[in-house]
Image: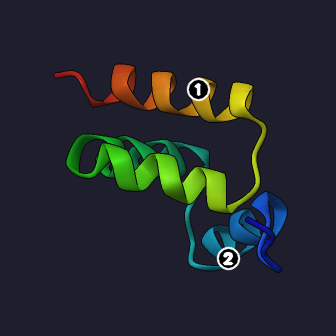
Amino acid sequence: MATDVNKQKWVEVLRNAGLDDAAMHRWHAAFEQRWPDGHQRFLEWLDLPAAEVTRIRTASRTAARP
């Protein structure tokens, strides 16, 4: 799905909102834990390559563990 928003633009929005790398990791972990299918669709909406989607989701699941 083509979109005008891409990873770079989304990261810029998060940075402008005050999120650092650690906060972005927590954001992904919370998204993955609560809505894994939605997280998948969101990453695909950003037009990320499949390998990057898998990497982000795997890291997010690991980060979400207590």
Q: Is residue 6 above or below residue 64?
A: below
- Image position of 65 (left or right of 15): left
Residue 24, given in percent of the width and then of the height, sits at 53, 51
Q: Is residue 45 above or below residue 34?
A: below
Q: Which residue occupies 63% across, 35% down?
A: 53
Residue assigned mark 1: 54
**Amino acid type of disc 2?**
Val
Q: Quadrant of residue 7 in the image?
A: bottom right
Q: Which residue occupies 21% across, 50% down?
A: 34
Q: Secondary structure at mark 2?
A: helix
Residue 61, given in percent of the width and then of the height, sits at 35, 26
Mark 1 nearby-residue class (10 Å; few <14, some 14–19, many ≥20): some
Residue 31, given in percent of the width and then of the height, sits at 35, 52
Mark 2 nearby-residue class (10 Å; few <14, some 14–19, many ≥20): few
- Image position of 9 (left or right of 22): right
Q: Is residue 41 above or below residue 4?
A: above
Name the quadrant of the N terminus: bottom right
**Amino acid type of disc 1?**
Thr
| Marked residue nearer the N-terminal end (1 or 2) | 2
Q: Which residue occupies 23% across, 22% down?
A: 65
- Image position of 5 (left or right of 19): right
Q: Which residue occupies 28% across, 30% down?
A: 64
Residue at the extreme left: 66
Question: Label 1 to label 2, Cα distance in Å?
Answer: 22 Å
Residue at the extreme front: 1
Q: Secondary structure at mark 1?
A: helix
Across the whole image, how many numbered discs are drawn on residues? 2
Residue 54, given in percent of the width and then of the height, sits at 59, 26
Q: Which mark is residue 13?
A: 2
Name the quadrant of the C terminus: top left
Q: Quadrant of residue 4 in the image?
A: bottom right
